[in-house]
Amino acid sequence: MEMELDPFLGVVLATAVLLVAVLRRKRGSSRKYKMPPGPRPWPVIGNLNLIGALPHRSIHALSARHGAFMSLRFGSVPVVVGSSVEAARFFLRTSDTSFIDRPRMAAGKYTAYDYSDIVWSPCGAYWRQARKLWKAHLFSDRQLRSQEHVRSEELRVLLRALSSSSSAGAAGRGRRAVALKEHLLMYSLNVISRMALGGKYVGEGGTAGSPISPAEFSWMVDELFLLNGVFCVGDFIPWLGWLDLQGYVGRMKRLGKMFDRFLEHVVDEHDQRRRREGGGFVPADMVDLLLELADDPKLEVPIERDGVKGFALDLIAGGTDSTAVTIEWAMSELLRKPEVLAKVTEELDGVIGHGRLVTEQDIPDLPYLEAVVKETLRLHPVTPLLAPRLCREDASTGSYDIPRGTLVFVNVWAIGRDPAVWGHDAEEFRPERFVGSAVDVKGHDLELLPFGSGRRMCPGYVLGLKMVQVTLANLLHAFSWRLPDSVAPEKLNMQEKFGLAVPRLVPLEAVAVPRLPPHLYAGP
Ligand code: HEM
């Protein structure tokens, strides 16, 4: 949601502000709402001028002045932001049915098959059915267990790749720093490709005729997350939309076409196998399952081909960037805190030993590692404002009204750093705060909501959490990590870059020295 105005856009908006200020007539409103307090909006742009390149931080600074329920106006759209546990309870629990809709924004239209995926689909029979199908079929415990071997095979590929790309001949200090995120993205993409699409469609070992290179694909995923998070002027000032002054809509249309070429190829291949195998066909991956579900005549709402492609896109997008971003933040925090890094390594040595890798079943025996993951998600929730919600009926907090049509954000980033909840050291990375604590990330504890909560909560959280925990555990178990000699831990750049996900601005580079017997880095 970048809102750094370019000069041309600035001139157009300033002219429009003037015009509207001059032409404005006082209109009577049919009902008087008592909205939460907030900064005074300008004509036309509302408060968009107050939103900087990192909206969760700009909004947090404004909430500190105006309150945990705060009104804003983006262009002509009323906005309310919740920034406390009480606000999260109101929006995501007690009045959750009023706020489970999504706004119709350009990103959903152009990058998500006209709102046919789950993330952008409006609340209704189609969305409810999609969530039910995902839960019962794609993300059932049985389905996730049956694909555990895929995750552990790809993990070994990751460890091998890290071991060879960091080696520069001599062991120890002679090693090169690796760009961790590139490796993590390729790994999570391969895991989700094999689980969802039945094979690797990108990069080394990709299926024949794959229409996409790894570099192109990783650019596409980055672009998708950026464009799904930007504040697009046309969404808020519709009469300026046709000008596409920021160029975002053009980029969305281009990206939508690129993903469509890729997904057409994937769906075609799956269709062909179904036809070839006829009655003997057995679904082997999530796209097979989706195609079979789409054919079910008992479906309440039909799922068209665009729906299948939209769901496949959710799987790819949800399964790749979010996990890679979280692990990169965890490693950054650990590299700044050698004593925490030493403690988590000690736990791994004690529980796992040096003879094997960590499995998903080991995680409950690694409470300090679990605490490290929670602490990372507290300080660096991947989507700090959750995905935008739309108020679909007038609601009231008791003190304030939220009219139908209001855009709602819950700033979970701010809640995760609230000293009233987390104490005076809320900004500090200190996993000990979770040791022996029952607070979890599964949507019950409103002070820690990296996956959201309620009916619109992330449906992939079990997989996402598993992947973050087991991957981080193995990175730490299989390698000793340090920053390059030129970077002092306290000087490590921790700046963020905004989009639907908030990754590091500068990718982390670190030196990885293998610490387990060589056969554990060999192929699966
Ligand atoms: C660390 C990993 C992940 C994090 C932190 C994360 C976080 C989130 C958040 C905050 C939301 C918005 C919830 C809301 O509006 O209240 C969301 C929605 C969603 N996530 Fe995830 N997610 C992760 C992994 C995944 C995975 C692995 C998948 C699927 C493979 C996935 C698929 C989705 C989908 C489809 C939605 C939209 C749900 C809806 O609108 O009904 N996510 N996620």
Image (cartoon, rainbow, N blue to C red):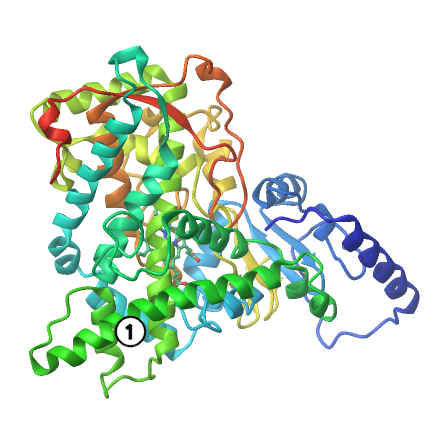
In-image side of 220 versus 62 (left or right): left
Residue found at the far bottom of this picture: 297
Q: Name the residue nearer the viewer: 404 or 331.
A: 331
Q: How many marks?
A: 1
Asked if residue 21 shows in the view, the reply is yes
Residue at image location 6% in from the left, 78% down from the top: 280
Residue 118 picture location, percent across and down = 39, 67
Q: Quadrant of ligand 1?
A: bottom left
Residue 189 picture location, percent across and down = 31, 50
Q: Which residue is mark 1?
A: 268
In-image side of 221 versus 338 (left or right): right
- Location of residue 41 by image quarter: bottom right
The response on whether ligand 1 sits within 8 Å of label 1 is no
The amino acid beneath tag 1 is Asp
Residue found at the far right of this picture: 22
Residue 116 picture location, percent across and down = 42, 73
Q: Examine the rendered structure and indicate whether residue 424 appears above or below residue 316.
A: above
Counting other residues with Cα less than 10 Å from the Cα at mark 1, is it few (<14), some (14-19), or many (20 or more)? few
Q: Examine the rendered structure and indicate whether residue 431 appears above or below residue 325.
A: above
Residue at image location 21% in from the left, 70% down from the top: 288
Asked if residue 436 shows in the view, the reply is no
Residue 113 picture location, percent across and down = 45, 72
Residue at image location 48% in from the left, 58% down from the top: 91
- Location of residue 331 by image quarter: top left
- Location of residue 262 by image quarter: bottom left
Q: Name the residue nearer the viewer: 209 or 12.
A: 209
- The quarter of the picture where the C terminus appears is top left
Residue at image location 38% in from the left, 55% down from the top: 317
Q: Secondary structure at mark 1?
A: helix
